Amino acid sequence: MAEIAAIILAAGRSSRFHAGPQDTKLIAPLFGKPLVRYVAEAALASRARPILVVTGHAAGKVETALDGLDLFLIANPHYQTGLSSSLKAGIAALPKTAAGAVILLADMPRISGELIDRLIRVFEASVEAPRAVAPVRGGSRGNPVLIGRGLFVAVAHLEGDRGARRLVEAGGEGVIECSVDDDAIEIDIDTRDALRRLETEATTSGR
């Protein structure tokens, strides 16, 4: 089986959430649990190993929210330059044996370990190692994406607030689409309203 890691991008400033200059949306409680802990626990429930968490803004608070979990924390001193710097830091910290990495956004609390494992299975089932595996629902790609080692070098050329999706869009025939019936790949928490809406929907549906 291929060795697939997970990289959780948790360094952003949460500007749209208005969390405050020394705070971050990633520690905002969702049913009593810090937002960032949901995706971390999903990664731990999957086959992906190791699991790296890239921190930057309010790093100490993010690390406290993840206390007790078997994760590797990677500091990104350049987080203010955008998402690409966090992706670069995560890729640079991967073991040389990693055949790929699932790139997870820390503000997507509905992602499950089962979904992560499905992307890994699709990657492994390919005759030739794909450049990436992207989940698709209703014709639209979402997150997380799994990027293969063949795209690791390309990460170094990303700039600003561009992440793995940019690489996947340019991956052409080397990208495998994985059809899923799970709206979790579309749900991220950018604002306080989005957080309240998710709480309300989850309570109503019994999730």
Image (tube, rainbow, N blue to C red):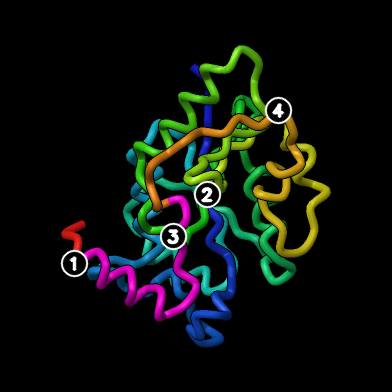
10 Å crowding of disc 1: few (<14), some (14-19), many (20+) = few
Per the image, the residue denoted by label 3 is 187
| Most distant residue in the top direction | 127
Front-lying residue, 197 or 92: 197
- Between marks 3 and 1, how big is the CA–CA gap? 17 Å
- Which residue is depicted at the point 45% across and 74% down? 25
Q: Which mark is residue 174?
A: 4
Where does residue 206 sit, x and y in percent of width and height? Answer: 16, 59
- Which residue is depicted at the point 55% across and 80% down? 16
Whichever of labels 2 and 3 marks the residue nearer the N terminus, that label is 2
Residue 21 shows up from this direction = yes
Whichever of labels 4 and 3 marks the residue nearer the N terminus, that label is 4
* Above or below, comparing residue 50 to residue 141 in the picture: above
Frontmost of labels 1 and 2 is 1
- Which residue is depicted at the point 66% across and 48% down? 164
Per the image, the residue denoted by label 1 is 204
Per the image, the residue denoted by label 2 is 143
Whichever of labels 2 and 4 marks the residue nearer the N terminus, that label is 2
